[in-house]
Amino acid sequence: MNVRIEIDTKTFVRFWLVVIGFALAAFAIYSAMTALIIIGAALFFAIALNSPVSRLARILPGQSRVAGTAIAYVAVLLFLGVIVFLVVPPILEQTVKFSQTVPNLIDTATQQYSGVKGFIDHYQLQPQVDKTIASVQESLSQFASGIGVTIVTSVSSVFSAITSGILVVVLTFLMLVEGPVWTKRLWSIYNDEERMKSDRRILYRMYNVVTSYVVGQLSVSAIAGFIAGLSVFILSLTMGIPSNLAVPAAAIIFILSLIPMFGAVIGAVVVSLLLILNNVTAGVIFIIFYIVYQQIEANYISPKIQSKRIDLSALAILVAVTIGLYLFGIVGGIISIPIAGCIKVLSEEYFAKAKKNRIKSENPVHKLLKKIQANS
C-alpha cells in the first residue's frame, strides 16, 4: 500500500530555513573559534580570580573593585617575575656549561672515528656509508630551503600568541571589574523570583566548581613542585650537581603540573634533561623517582584533594582533558575539567527537575486539579 505524505509549502520552507540557520550558526562558531577560546580563557581566569579580588575590594578604602583587581594583577605579575628570575639564570648557566663541554665531546668522537673507519674499510662498507651520507645531505638541503618559511611562520605564531595573551589579560581585568554590575543586570531581568533563585543556585554551583578546581590544582601542583625541588636538592648533596637547580626544578614542575594529566610528565622530562647536562645518573634517578611519585599523586594525593571539589570520575576527567587538548590545545587542557564539572552540574539539575515534574504529574491530586482546571 502506497502512503502519500503531503507537506505544505510553509512547513517545507520553515524546515529548510531552520537547517540553513543551524549551518550558518555552526560556520560562524567555527570562524570565530579563536576569539571564543580567548573569551572563554578570560572568563575562566576571571572566575578563578574573583574570590581574592572580592576579598581585597572589601578591605580597601571605598571598597574599590578596580583597586582590588589591580593589586591582584600586580601580585600575579610579581609572582611570575620571581619565578622567571629564579628559573632562567640557572638554565642559562647549565646551557653555557654544556656548550663549553661540546669541544671535548667532538674530540672524543673524532678519536673514536678512526677505529670506526678501520672497521668500515675492513668490511667494505664504504658504499653504504656514502649513500647514507648523501641521503642525509639531501634531507638537510631540503630543510635549509624551507627554513625561511619556518622562521616566518614561527615569528608569526609568536606574535599571535603574544596578542592573544594581551587580549586575555585585558578581558580578564574588565570582567573582574564589571562582573558584579553585569550579574545584577542579569538577575534584574527575571520576573519569576522562583526561577531566578533556581538559576542563581545553578550558577553558584558552577562557580564553586571552577574555584574549587583552581584551588585544588594549585595545591596539587605546589606539592609536586616542593617534592621535585627537595629531590633535586638531595641529589645535589649526593651526586655533585649544582644545588641551585632545586628552585628551577620546583618552579618548572609547579607551572607545568597546572596542565592536567600530561603537564607533570612534560615537566619531569624537562628537569631530567637539565640534570643530565650535569650528571646522567642523577637525571635517570630523578625520572624514576618522579614516575613513582606520579603514581602516589594520581592514586592518593590528587583524589584526596580534588574528589570533594569536582566529583568527577577518572574516566570523565581523562575524556574531558583529551577532548580539550585536541580541540583547543594547552588552554583547552587546563579548562576542560571545570567545564566537565559544570556540565555535570547542569545534567544533575536537569534530571532532578525532570524527575520532580514526572512525580508531580503522576500525583493523583495533581491530576484531579488539572482536570478541574481544564473543565472550568
Image (spheres, helix red, strand yellow):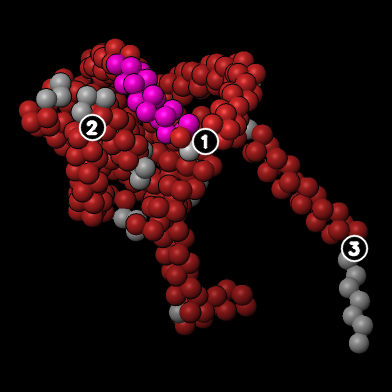
- If the image is split into quadrants, where does the N terminus sit? bottom right
Q: Do the residues labelled 1 and 2 touch (CB within 8 Å)?
A: no
Circle number at residue 280: 2
Inspect the image, locate mark 2, and give the three-letter code of the amino acid beneath it. Val
- If the image is split into quadrants, where does the C terminus sit? bottom right
Residue depicted at 29% across the width and 16% down the height: 104
Which tag, 1 or 3, sits closer to the chain's start?
Answer: 3
Tell which of 165 and 253 is nearer to you: 253
Inspect the image, locate mark 1, and give the three-letter code of the amino acid beneath it. Gln
Give x and y (percent) for residue 257.
Answer: 30, 37
Q: Is residue 81 above or below residue 206?
A: above
Inspect the image, locate mark 3, and give the three-letter code of the amino acid beneath it. Asp
Q: How crowded is mark 2: few (under 14 residues within 10 Å), some or many (20 or more)?
A: some
Q: Give the range drawn in magenta.
A: 104-121
Q: Give the number of the mark in front: 1 or 3.
A: 1
Tell which of 61 and 273 is nearer to you: 273
Q: Is residue 177 above or below residue 194?
A: above
Q: Residues within 10 Å of mark 3 (few under 14, many from 20)?
A: few
Please identify the residue farthest to the front as the structure is shown: 122
Q: Name the residue under label 3.
A: 8
Residue depicted at 30% across the width and 30% down the height: 273
Residue 148 in sight from this viewpoint: yes
Give x and y (percent) for residue 88.
Answer: 29, 16
Q: Mark 1 points at which residue?
A: 124
